[in-house]
Image (cartoon, rainbow, N blue to C red):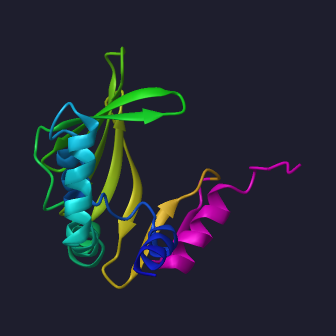
Amino acid sequence: MAATLLTCGAFLCSSCIGSFGLHSRLLSWNQNIDDNKFVNELAFFALAVVQAYTVSWLADAIILNSVEFWTGTNPMASIGEVKKVHGTNGNYLVETLENGYSITKEGEDTAMQLIYDEELNTWNVVADGTSTEFLKLHGNGMATLPLPSGEDLTVTIDANGVAAARQATMADTYYAFR
């Protein structure tokens, strides 16, 4: 029952809000304890029995991801840490900066940064020396993001705001079902 609720909660609560740094570190540590996959599996079961995964996931979901969302800083992030992310268009190297992230496609030299400006309370993308604001947090539960049309969209910082932003930015995206 608990596993079902946890799984449902993971799907219902997942979004781009937090990185689940504590849970990810625990999982990464567990996967690399030993070269023998059976040792790793036994460690996984031991951690599952003592609810280590549940506690780390809840700590991330309730506390650490909230801190990351509101401050723009992940308390579990290590500045200078580089992680490889597998995407549909190849692999990317994501480096944690003091005020954001640097993203480079594997095998390429050019990078793009996602930078948080604490003074203006904005997130900006920096590419080819040009900085473009893509999210402004207002502090009153609202945020503004520029649309491809050039207009600005102000939304609430909740599930309804995320749905409105997705609808506005994906207006020209069509899906075919079989």
Work out whether residue 92 can be spotted: yes
- Which residue is pictured at 17% across the width and 50% down the height? 99
- Up-down: is 167 above or below 126? below
Residue 83 picture location, percent across and down: 25, 36
- Which residue is pictured at 61% across the width and 50% down the height? 148
Left or right relative to 23: residue 135: right
Q: Nearer the viewer, residue 146 or 36?
A: 36
- Up-down: is 58 above or below 89? below
Left or right relative to 97: residue 173: right
Residue 18 picture location, percent across and down: 32, 63
Return the residue found at the far right.
Answer: 178
- The quadrant holding residue 58 is bottom left
Residue 132 picture location, percent across and down: 39, 45
Residue 173 picture location, percent across and down: 74, 49
- The quadrant holding residue 38 is top left
- Up-down: is 37 above or below 142? above
Q: Which residues are magenta?
A: 150-178
Q: Nearer the viewer, residue 90 or 168?
A: 90
